[in-house]
Image: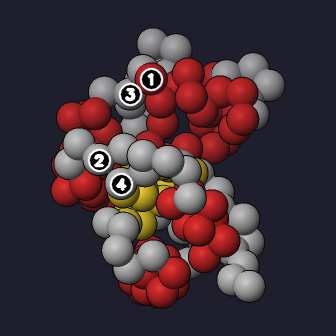
Amino acid sequence: MAGGVEQYIQNVIATPGVRSVLVVLDAEGDCAAAEGPRLLERCRSVASHVPTRIVMPCMIYENWLAASPVEGEERTPGQGGWEGPSALAWLKARVTGYKKTVHQARLTATLDFDLTASRCPSFGRFLRCVDDLGDGMIASCTEPPS
């Protein structure tokens, strides 16, 4: 039986009505340009008939969140620019008790898409993948099982 992303894809495509899949997971220390195609190949090995895209925010998802104003406050890009390692610390300093599972959805809902895409090329890729998948029902996950 397949594990990790393969199991996630199998579970998602078993859901009635799903016509496409978008997987979003942190690149963390991995090179998204190298790891993304490998993950996509693994997805296609179990579901070649379902349009699937992989998007890996450079470093972490929080880079996307911190590229748009949070709680009315604008961030100055730190070391590594907008997709560098400082976003999580910046968010935690502004969002009391920041927890991914609690705060990501609310902060994502407030993103300025154009501004975030101009600052984070990986977010621009995310938007292109959403457009590419069209009006298909999209299943998304920030962290597929390993």
Q: Nearer the viewer, mark 1 or mark 2?
A: 2
Question: According to the image, label 1 marks what residue?
Answer: 109
Q: Nearer the viewer, mark 1 or mark 3?
A: 1
Kind of element beneath mark 4: loop
Q: Left or right? Give the position of 20 relative to 58.
A: left
Which amino acid, by three-letter code, is at mark 4? Arg
Quarter of the image for residue 95 reads: top right
Kind of element beneath mark 2: loop
Q: Quadrant of the N terminus?
A: bottom right
Question: According to the image, label 4 marks what residue?
Answer: 19
Residue in the picture at 56% in, 22% down: 106
Which amino acid, by three-letter code, is at mark 2? Gly
Q: Nearer the viewer, mark 4 or mark 1?
A: 4
Disc 2 or 3, which lies upstream in sequence? 3
Residue in the picture at 55% in, 51% down: 15
Kind of element beneath mark 3: loop
Q: Residue 125's spot in the image, x, y percent?
A: 27, 58
- Spatial separation of the CA atoms under disc 4 and disc 1: 24 Å
- Spatial separation of the CA atoms under disc 1 and disc 3: 6 Å
Kind of element beneath mark 1: helix
Q: Are the two marked residues, 2 and 4, in contact with CB atoms closer than 8 angstroms?
A: yes
Q: Nearer the viewer, mark 2 or mark 3?
A: 2
Question: According to the image, label 2 marks what residue?
Answer: 136
Question: According to the image, label 3 marks what residue?
Answer: 111
Q: Are the two marked residues, 1 and 3, in contact with CB atoms closer than 8 angstroms?
A: yes
Q: Left or right? Give the position of 24 relative to 1.
A: left
Q: Are the two marked residues, 4 and 3, in contact with CB atoms closer than 8 angstroms?
A: no
